Amino acid sequence: MDLFLKRTIAYILDFFVVSAFMWIISYFAYFFINYFNMFQIYHYFVFILPVIILFYFTILEKNLGATIGKRLMFIEVKSTMPKRGRLGRDYSLTYSQALIRSLSKIYWFPIIIDVILGKITGKTRLLDGITRTTVVEEDTELLLRNR
């Protein structure tokens, strides 16, 4: 399967995961809203959603190297600028790399512009080029050998 197609499917899967978080938040917020009759709080979800999306993508890509959708599609995010560590080169992302590359994912429209501009510049996404990151296939043989 093409890497771009895997990335697209992973993004859609991540959309469902973030939607589940939003459903849980709105379920618990309903008790507060209904009790105090404050239905205008739903207007704030437009601002809460980007924060949850940025938190989700930034934390998972920094700490695990991939989101849930990426793990299911066997792809991961790597830095193209390795850091030297005790065990050799470390290709993990920094928090700033993870946050900046996640900025266009807050709504569906910016990610489309990011992909179009990335194709023009020769990358898959413009923010991948700016943050010096890349998405690669996981080494599944290495995973199976380590189990």
Image (spheres, rainbow, N blue to C red):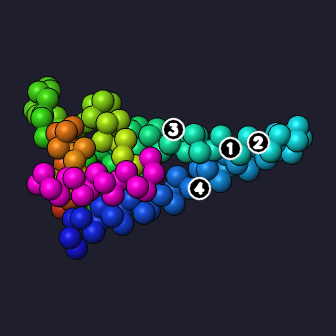
Q: Are marks 3 and 2 in contact (CB under 8 Å)?
A: no
Ranked by sequence position, the earlier of labels 2 and 4 is 4
Determine which residue is flagged by label 3. Answer: 51
Q: Nearer the viewer, mark 4 or mark 3?
A: 3
Q: Are marks 1 and 4 in contact (CB under 8 Å)?
A: no
Near-viewer residue (53 or 104): 104
Q: Provide residue 17's location: percent of width, then percent of height.
A: 51, 56
Callout 2 secondary element: helix
Determine which residue is flagged by label 1. Answer: 43
Quadrant of res 109: bottom left
Ranked by sequence position, the earlier of labels 1 and 4 is 4
From mark 1 to mark 2, how far is it between C-alphas?
A: 6 Å
Q: Provide residue 81's location: percent of width, then percent of height.
A: 12, 35
Mark 2 residue type: Gln
Q: Are marks 1 and 2 in contact (CB under 8 Å)?
A: yes
Q: Provide residue 42's location: percent of width, then percent of height.
A: 71, 45
Ranked by sequence position, the earlier of labels 3 and 2 is 2
Ranked by sequence position, the earlier of labels 4 and 3 is 4
Determine which residue is flagged by label 2. Answer: 40
How many C-alpha atoms fall within 10 Å of the one at disc 2: few (<14), some, or many (≥20)? Answer: few
Determine which residue is flagged by label 4. Answer: 20
Mark 3 residue type: Val
